[in-house]
Structure formats: C-alpha cells, structure tokens
Amino acid sequence: MIKVVDIKAIKEDLEAKAFNLIDVREADEFAAGRVPGAVNLPLSELASRYQGLAADKPYHIICQMDTRSAQACAFLDSKGYDVTNISGGTSAWMGALEQ
C-alpha cells in the first residue's frame, strides 16, 4: 500500500527540506511555480529516468492535485522505491511557490 500524506500536514518538513521531494508535473508547469525544494521529474519521462533516483532514499511525490503523483507512486513502488504521495498537491500549498 502506498503511503499518502496531506501537504498541509507536512508543511514544516517541506520547508526544512526533511525529505526528497519530486514534482512530476511537466517542465512548463514546474517552471511556472513549485513547492520550495522540489526537483522536477515529469511523469512523461519517469519510466525512462527513474533509475537516476537512489533506491535507498525515501521520496515524496507531488503534482498539481495528486492524480499524476499517485500514478508516479504506483510505478515507483512497483520498482521497489519508498514513496509517499502528497495529497492536495501544489494546489493546496499554503506558501509562496518558487519560480
């Protein structure tokens, strides 16, 4: 079962960069604004680039609402990665988005 956490519940951890945050939105969406500390790995490129992720590190996955991040989590979980889906996505972020 894939872990899910609400973005509002982990705001302090996000701000402290307490974990690896991957944003799976497309590059143009990511460039328009992202949660601080997020690294972009678009869902459309995930299957060909996921091997670049360290298999021994946990990852929190985010998108706009949480649909694409859920898909990314299912894929990465099937490959043995420790992933958590952030529900609410960037739409629910209560701070300023970086650009």
Image (tube, grey):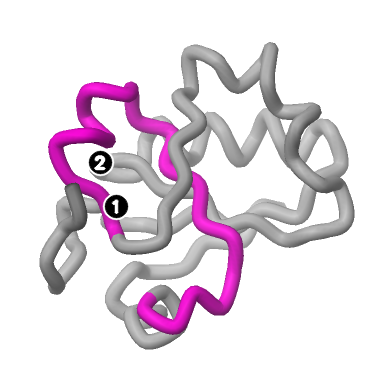
Q: Residues within 10 Å of mark 2 (few under 14, many from 20)?
A: many
Q: Are marks 1 and 2 in contact (CB under 8 Å)?
A: yes
Report if residue 65 lies within the magenta region: no
Q: Position of residue 86 (x, y in %)?
A: 43, 58
Residue lying at 32% horizontally and 62% vertically, measured from the top left: 36
Residue lying at 34% horizontally and 30% vertically, measured from the top left: 25
**Please, is residue 8 above or below residue 31 in the view?**
below
Q: Residues within 10 Å of mark 1 (few under 14, many from 20)?
A: many
N-terminal-most mark, 1 or 2: 2
**Please, is residue 43 above or below residue 1 in the view?**
above
Q: Amino acid at mark 2?
A: Gln
Residue lying at 50% horizontally and 31% vertically, measured from the top left: 41
Q: Position of residue 8 (x, y in %)?
A: 28, 76
The span picked out in magenta is 15-35
Q: In the rendered structure, find residue 64 and report the number of the disc placed on it.
A: 2
**Please, is residue 3 above or below residue 64 in the view?**
below
Q: Position of residue 12 (x, y in %)?
A: 37, 87
Report if residue 28 lies within the magenta region: yes
Relative to residue 52, is residue 92 drawn left or right? Answer: left
Residue lying at 18% horizontally and 61% vertically, measured from the top left: 92
Circle 1 residue: 89
Q: Position of residue 91 (x, y in %)?
A: 16, 52
Q: Secondary structure at mark 2?
A: loop
Relative to residue 80, is residue 37 drawn left or right? Answer: left
